Amino acid sequence: GNSVTQMEGPVTLSEEAFLTINCTYTATGYPSLFWYVQYPGEGLQLLLKATKADDKGSNKGFEATYRKETTSFHLEKGSVQVSDSAVYFCALSPSNTGKLIFGQGTTLQVKP
Amino acid sequence: GAGVSQSPSNKVTEKGKDVELRCDPISGHTALYWYRQSLGQGLEFLIYFQGNSAPDKSGLPSDRFSAERTGGSVSTLTIQRTQQEDSAVYLCASTGVGDRIDTQYFGPGTRLTVL
């Protein structure tokens, strides 16, 4: 079946530190991959996406590369800010279905 | 334009009562999704609408859960005979014709508490 596994949190970093949140997936076919973010008190927002192998999604300084050989889509940012504190969800959409299958979410706290 | 809206934002009900949750998608969006976010289960897919039909209902957890969509717009998720394990945040999302079907825009959610 289809599933997403992401590293457990919470992750606590100091401002300007390097961020990696690991995400691996299991899927049949060729899914699209996503990172969604949920800021405190706000709704779920799309952060970035990649639709095929070796694609790199990027937004707001965050990047993730679709690695089919390792079935991974790790989220990275070179220098985090306090405003990046949020819950990050990795997700996949199986081919042609539209629905999203989410990982458990990783809470990121960035301290000044 | 306006985003996806959901009502009510909060709902407290007693065990055994029925509840209705409403979703207004972005105008013109043809696909609509319901998800549930709970502490124990994370974010789970419930049901997907394309227009007024539901080609994928695989995530509905029991026959107490049903959903409909009318006029290709508003959707209602109904939970009958609510149980405490139904307590969760219910999220709605929609996708436009111009987007890939998997680019979804989420509403703020309805927080359901079953006492």
Image (spheres, grey):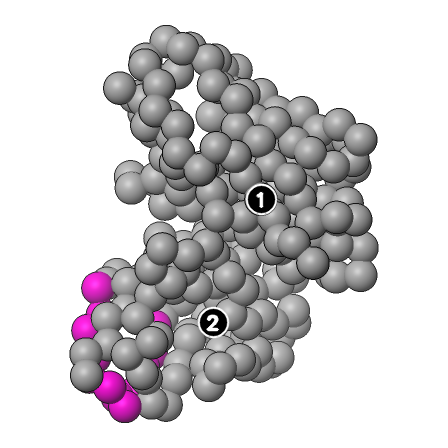
> For the point 27% across and 90% down, which residue is it?
A16
Between residues B63 and A45, which one lies in front from this camera angle? A45
Crowding near the residue tagged with mark 2, few <14, some 14–19, many ≥20 C-alpha atoms within 10 Å: many
Crowding near the residue tagged with mark 1, few <14, some 14–19, many ≥20 C-alpha atoms within 10 Å: many
Mark 1 falls on what kind of element?
strand
| Three-letter residue code for mark 2 | Phe
Comparing labels 2 and 1, the label whose residue is closer to the camera: 1
Rendered location of residue A53, percent (x, y): 62, 75
Whether residue B49 sits left or right of residue B35 in the image: it is: right
> CB atoms at circles 2 and 1 under 8 Å apart?
no
Q: Image height check: is B54 above or below A79?
A: above
Q: Are marks 2 and 1 on the same chain?
A: no
Mark 2 falls on what kind of element?
loop
Is B105 in the magenta? no
Q: Chain of mark 2?
A: A
Quadrant where the C terminus of chain A is found in the figure: bottom left
Q: Image height check: is A72 above or below B36?
A: below
Whether residue A99 sits left or right of residue A76 in the image: it is: right
Q: In this view, which residue lies farthest toward the front? A: B1
Mark 2 — residue? A73
The dot on residue B5 is 1
Is A18 in the magenta? yes
What span is in magenta?
A10-21
Rendered location of residue A9, percent (x, y): 23, 63
Residue B46 seen by the camera: no
Q: Image height check: is A46 above or below B29?
A: below
Q: Quadrant of residue B9?
A: top left
> For the point 47% across and 19% down, which residue is it?
B19
| Three-letter residue code for mark 1 | Ser
Q: Marks 2 and 1, Cα distance to the nearest angstrom? A: 30 Å
